[in-house]
Structures are given as structure tokens and as C-alpha cells.
Image (spheres, grey):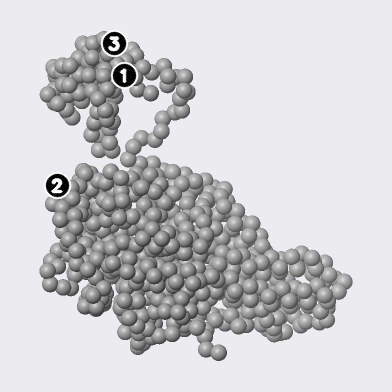
Amino acid sequence: MPKEKFTVTAALPYANGPLHLGHVAGVYLPADIFVRFLRMNDHDVAFICGSDEHGAAITLRAKKEGISPQEIVDKYNSVIGKAFNDFNISFDIFHRTSAELHHETAKDFFKRLNNEGLFTKETSEQFYDEEFKQFLADRYIAGTCPNCKSENAYGDQCESCGTSLSPADLINPLSTLSGKKPILKETYHWYLPMQDHEGWLKDWIQKGELNGELQHDASKWRNQVIGQCMSWIDNGLRPRAMTRDLDWGVKVPVEGADGKVLYVWLDAPIGYISATKQWAQDNGKNWEDYWTRDRKLVHFIGKDNIVFHAIIFPILLKAHGGLILPENVPAYEFLNLEGGKFSTSRNWAVWLHEYIERYPNRIDELKYVLTSIAPETKDSEFTWKEFQTRINSELADILGNFVNRALVLTHKYYDGLVPQVNELNDEDKHVLEEMASIPRRIAKLTYQYKLREAQAEAMNLARLGNKYLADTEPWKLIKTDPERVKTIMNIALQITANLSIVLQPFLPNIASKLEAFLNISNNNWNNAGSNDLLNAGHRINKPEILFTKVDDELVEAEVKLLEEKAKENMKFEPQKEETSFDDFMKMDVRLGKILTAEKVEKADKLLKLTVDTGIDTRTIVSGIAQHYSTEEVIGKTVTVLLNLAPRKIRGIESQGMILMAENAEGELAFVSPEKEFEPGSGVR
């Protein structure tokens, strides 16, 4: 029976910064495990990825660093690509959407859909920054999420809860360029009328059916993927603009589209196709074999990209005609870090390239830990303490201990030659049966995209071997029953040989070491579970320690480093020491009205204010002269701390304090009520 063919994609990372462990655990590592397994099972598979270089996030980063968008993408494409290579992610190609071939492919795709009448050209009002004189792409708009109320949501999605948004959904939208409220201004774009596709999408997502024919096994789709898609559909799909007013990206290839580029979520998924084209050209293949034939398309993504890969891109693929739709979209939830969310702005992250620089010999250990805690169906958390525990208690004490015992005893008793098997007892038969069943369970789980459970089954084989040696105690039997020990050690070595196979998708470097120890080469899954991978008399090599344990000093150093880096990137001072409610209630904070204001002589920063507090009129000296003129402050309703002990400032007795807000740039602003309250009103 011919093997199924796969085209596997991993979400294109934005080339505006390096990769952190959340990215790795939620997309690239599981995709790599799945692909390695497919290859071992003789599937024809193409593993496609590349950097997404046209998002608004790119131009934002370029503005921040004061360089061009091209310099940004060149820089981070290199950083990301090297990290993938060093982490041993086995892409067939890691391409980039700034490549000429991609621009050609994306333009041809748009023109075909436009000629087929898929898009509608519509005029609408969109947010516009008057100070910067430009329309604002989704990522240039920030505000409060209508779903979770996070104040750091963008115009395309909320990074706190993962909800996909449109700029109009945001509460109190602000331009990320000027920090000011944008205006609405008329412009025109090409729209995808997604509401026209609701009918077939429902059947395809929920049942796996398209035009009455079964296209994929919907039971293998994760609940959160189906749930998020159906929530969108049930709430009514809306037209979505497929173009943007920007000067960085793939130019819209039709007349009258000057200053417009393709929307990144039209542009980026086409990057999978253009990358496949490039790989096919480089390897003498036909790209269409991987997108238009009887093949399974699988997208590994994070949960914030679900609707783009399971609704928008399938609409585009189907409308194009002749292209395959996704077989599955295994989306991962978020990985958190040491009690908080990964945050690039706060530098609350473990960056992959920095980890590799510090621990180049602990690549597979990190892979093991990340897969063990993979956020397949719910958010999970990485901590350095769990990193230590899993390496020490599982990899070192179970897998490493078993392999070392099996190989060291073979060298000690048989000079490194595999002993022959004698008569098997019931215990031996049970162990061999279990050894044969584990690869089948791993395969079943992997085809179901349950990779965390699949890795746990692979480790169960090491547990089986460890327990077998602990129960049979060959180091004691060697004196009384040496023939029995030969059987025990042969079985232990067969388990080790099987580990060199079943660990290859998960721990490829460790699997290669096991092959080197055993003096074999075997990367075919069909051989897993066999009890004759090593013939009697086969010579094995001397082993080395597979895993060194992680000490407390490493954990403490990493947590300290994380906290120090986050402190360096904090815009504001950390929280002050805890105070009691009683102490807080001693503070008399009220609203006051500034009646007069004058500059203090020989003091550039000070204003002398007369303030009506509702209970009296008093003098307060305030250091706001560099932020406000005397004319600006007169008549202002402000917040005043009344019962601060009076003190003399430049010879003037100040009888209180005006409370001000201060941003990261040191600018001051009055803390004033949104309604007109009279002086003396208390602040609670």
C-alpha cells in the first residue's frame, strides 16, 4: 500500500526579533518531531518554513532601531535561521518572503483571485495618524481588548488572550507611532468577502467534508481549533481587507493601487508555496507535486494564528483552484515562563540563540523538557526548576542510567561483544512483548499529533529497561548463573538498540550517540520493536555519560539572569515596599483647584501655586515648570496630598503636594477627574 505524502509547514516567524522558547515549544519543535517521524516511516514529506518579512511589526522595529526594514529583516532572518540550524530543526528549506520569487508568486496569486472576482474593491474609513501623515496598519494601532480588557492589544489580535481583532474592535485605540488618538479617513482596499464562504467552511471544519466528499479526519483536529473557527463563523464572518496602505511589502499588482501592498495574512501563507517552489527548483522537483496532488497539508502554528490558517488561507486556496486544503492545523496554546507570560518588550524571555550559546551540549535536553510540557491543549509553563528536575530525574536517572548499565556491563562481562540469548522465562517474554508494543503506541499517538504523549511512551521504553535490570540484578547473578545473565544482557542491549530508533524524532543527537555506542545505523521505524537488532557476537563501542546533571547553581543563575534582564527593560520603577491599608488611609488626598501660579525665582523647575482645597486655600510649591506654563495650570483641577508635613522650598513654605503621573520618558501629566468635581472631593 503506498505511503501517504505530506507537505508540512511551520508558521513563518516574523523577522523582527529572535526566537524564544515559547515559539519553539509551540510550533517548530513539534513540527520537527512529526516530520522526523514521517521520514523514518518512508513518507514522502516536504518540511517548509521561512521568515515573514512584510508585517507591520517589521516597520515598527525598523523605526525603533533607526534603520531600514530591509536591514531589519536581513539581520533577524540570519539570527533566526542560525538558531534553527544550531537547534537541529530539519527544514527542507528556510526561505524568506522578501525574495523575488515570493513577490512574483504572491502577485500572481492575487491577480488570479482578482481576475476570478474573489475580491471586492471598497471605500471605507480607516484610522489615520495626522502627525505621521499615514494610514495605520493593524499593528500600528493599540488599545484595550474588548474580550479580556488587556490594555496592550493590537489592531489585528490581542497577545494576552489570543483573540483575533480588527482595529475598530479596540477600545480607546491609539496610534503606536505618535501615541495619539487617530482620526478616521477615507481610503479604498480590496476585500475578501469571507461571509460568502461560511457554508462550505462549516462542513469542512466540523466534518472534514468538502462538496460532499470526506477531505480530512475532523476527529484529529484539536478542540480549540474547531472551537475558535466555529466561534468566528457562528458570529458571522465579515469582509476583510486584503491590502494595506504601506510602502513595505508585496506591491498590489493592479492599476490604481499605488502605495498599497498585500495584507500580511494574504502575503505570508503564500510564502509556504513560494518556499516550496524555491526548494523544488534547487532540487530538481516539481513544486506542484507538493500542493496540487493527492497529499496531506499540515500547518503547525500557535493558537493566535488559527483563523488565518483554518479560515482565511483555506478560502484563498479553494478559490485559487487546484490546490490542496489543510489536512490538519495542530495549533498550540501559549507557553509561559516562571510565573509570567513571555514578553519581548520586557525581555521576560529565554532566547533560543542565547540558550544555545550558553549550553551548546544541552540541545536535546531542552528539546525533551519543552516536549514534556508542550502546550498542546492548554497553556503550560517553563521553569528552570522543572528543567533541572526532568533532566536529572528522567533523562539522567532513567535513560542515562539504563544505557550506561547495559553497555558497561557488556564490556565488563563480554569484552564488548553482544552475548547470545538462551532460554526465555516469563519475565523476559513480557519485557520483549512490551518492547514490541511501545513503538506501535508511539506511532499511533504521533499520527494523532499527540507528541507529548508519544515522547512519554519513548521514555517508557527506557523505564522498562531500567526496571528490568533492577529486577533481574545481573551483577549479582553473574556469579551464580552466568548463562542467565547472557539472556538478560542481550535483552537489555536490544532495548538500547530500540531506544536508538524511537528516540530519533524527539532526541536526534542522543539517538545518534546511542547508534555510535552500539556501532549500528538504523533510521527505519519498521525495525522498531524487534528483538534481533543486534546479533550475538556484534561488537559495541565503549559508552560515555549521556547526561550530566543540572546543579542548583545553574537554576539560580538563570532565574537571576532572567530577572536582571527584565529589570533593565522595565520602563517604570518596580513596585515599592508593601504598605498597610491603615497607613494608606492616613493619607488625605483630595481634589484641588489651582487659583494662581508664578515662577519661583532662580528655580527653573518650580512653580508657586495657590490652591483651593475645598477646606482652605494654601500655597504649594511644585516641580512642574518645565512641563507646564503658569497660564496652562491656572484653573486646573488637580489631585493634592494635603496632610504632608509642610516644608520650606527656596524659602517658601509648601503645604502639600500636587500628585502627577510620569511616563517612561519623564513627561509629567496632571491626575485629574474625568468629570467636573468640586475642590475638596476625596480621592479613595
Q: Which mark is residue 681?
A: 1
* Distance from the alpha carbon under mark 3 to that under mark 1: 10 Å
Q: Give the amino acid type for the residue marked by disc 3 in the picture.
A: Ile
Residue at the far bottom: name it: 1
Q: Residue at x 17, y 61 (%)?
A: 123
Query: Contact (CB < 8 A) between labels 2 and 3?
Result: no
Q: Answer whether labels 2 and 1 touch (C-beta < 8 Å).
A: no
Residue 371 is situated, as x and y percent measured from the top left of the image, at 53, 62
- Measured in 3D between alpha carbons, the distance from the residue under mark 2 to the one under mark 3, in whole angstroms, is 43 Å
Left/right placement of residue 344 relative to residue 625 reads right
Circle 3 sits on which residue?
Answer: 615
Above or below, 211 relative to 54 = below
Q: Nearer the viewer, residue 45 or 172?
A: 172
Dot 3 lies on which element?
loop
Query: Is residue 376 shown left or right of residue 472?
Result: left
Give the residue displayed 48% in from the left and 69% down from the top.
206
Q: Residue at x 25, y 25 (%)?
A: 676
Earlier residue among tags 3 and 1: 3
Judging depth in this view, the residue of 117 and 424 nearest the camera is 117
Q: Which mark is residue 643?
A: none
**Residue at 15% from the left image edge and 50% from the top image edge:** 132
Image position, residue 415 (x, y; %) = 72, 77
